[in-house]
Structures are given as structure tokens and as C-alpha cells.
Image (cartoon, rainbow, N blue to C red):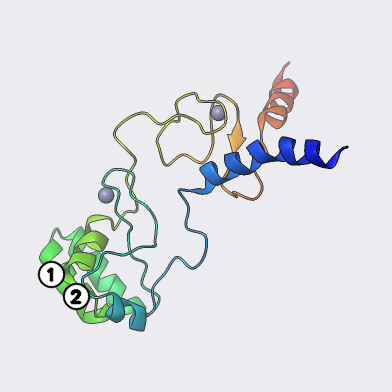
Amino acid sequence: MHADEECFTEQPQVRFQERVRSNIPMEKNSYSRAEVLAAGNTLPERGPLCHECGARIPVFEDIPEAAEKRVRECIRENRPVMAMIELRYATGCSLGWAKLWVQHSAGPKPARKETPCPYCGMPLRTSLAKQCRFCWRDWHDEDNVVQARANVVDENLHRLP
Ligand SMILES: [Zn+2]
Ligand SMILES: [Zn+2]
């Protein structure tokens, strides 16, 4: 293949990957205690992205297991303010971070509006989905997007009487 041609054909592929990857953090996802303290009141820039409110949910590297358990107990008992106090005490984080964490203790929430599959454009089950029920692509591992359809068809064939 001619060098120019090669360049031309590879370009869209690169753009495509960038688009697909833009939603996921590339490097470290979490914060050490020192980083938490340094961040202060500025909102976290990394951590799982909530699709409903657009916030990053902080991940604390140095929270003691027992403390996290206490925080989660408070949340279960419907005492969010106490949970935030416990979390701040355990991590040194700001009120804003504690609120984000407690509000998202079950993980990021999906977007309210329909999200198209990045590969085929059909609607995903939720914006947090990592696989598509229409084109069968599965991008749990962004570096290894698989298409499971062949396997499913095979399995169904085996089930036929
Ligand atoms: Zn949210
Ligand atoms: Zn799809």
C-alpha cells in the first residue's frame, strides 16, 4: 500500500477510538490522602463519571476499611449527614467531595435520556451499558472490543431440538 493511502485510511479509525474513549479516565482513577487534601474544595477530576449529573465520583485510596464500612452503614440507615461527617473524618476530603461520594455510594447513575451505541447508533439499555443488544459489541475492555453475536448464535443452535 502507498504511504499516503495508509495515512488516509487510518485517520478515521483514530478519531473513532478517541470518541469512544473520551468518557473513560485513562490513568489512575483514585486519590491518595495527600491528593485529597491538596484538591481541597475543587471538584474531583477523575473517578467514575455519573451520567446523570456529570460529576466525577472520588475514589479514596487510603480510606480504612472499617471507616468505609461505617460510612456505608450510615447511608443504609438513611443518615447521609452522619455518613458525610464520617467520610470527611476518615479521608480529610471537603464537604463537596463527601456529598458526591455519599450521593453516589451505589455508583454512577445512568443518563436520563437515551444514549446511542457508539458503534451502531441504536439505543443502549442505559448510558452506562458496556455492551449493545443490537450489534452485540461488548466494550467492557476498551482495548479489546468484542462482538459476541457469533457465540450467541452458536449457543442457540446447540439448544435446538
Ligand atoms: Zn450523579
Ligand atoms: Zn450497537
Q: Which mark is residue 86?
A: 2
For the residue marked with disc 1, what is the amino acid? Met
Q: Kindly identify the residue that appears in the image at 23 percent across and 69 percent down.
A: 71
For the residue marked with disc 2, what is the amino acid? Glu
Give the side of residue 44 with respect to residue 147, left or right. Answer: left
The location of residue 2, given as percent across then percent down, is 86, 38
Q: Classify 10 Å Cα crowding around label 2: few (below 14), some (14-19), many (20 and above).
A: some
The location of residue 46, given as percent across then percent down, is 39, 62
In the displayed image of the protein, which residue is found farthest to the top?
Answer: 161
The answer for how far apart the CA atoms under marks 1 and 2 are is 6 Å
Question: Which corner quadrant of the image does residue 47 belong to?
Answer: bottom left
Name the residue that disc number 1 marks. Answer: 82
Give the side of residue 113 with respect to residue 79, left or right. Answer: right
The answer to whether residue 29 is above or below residue 1 is below
- 1 and 2 marks in contact (CB < 8 Å): yes
Q: Kindly identify the residue that appears in the image at 42 percent across and 42 percent down.
A: 128
Residues 149 and 47: in front is 47
Q: Classify 10 Å Cα crowding around label 1: few (below 14), some (14-19), many (20 and above).
A: some
Q: Quadrant of the N terminus?
A: top right
Q: Quadrant of the C terminus?
A: top right
Residues 1 and 63: in front is 1
The location of residue 138, given as percent across then percent down, is 59, 39
The answer to whether residue 134 is above or below residue 139 is above
Q: Kindly identify the residue that appears in the image at 37 percent across and 52 percent down.
A: 49
Residues 108 and 18: in front is 18
The answer to whether residue 124 is above or below residue 87 is above
Residues 12 and 36: in front is 12
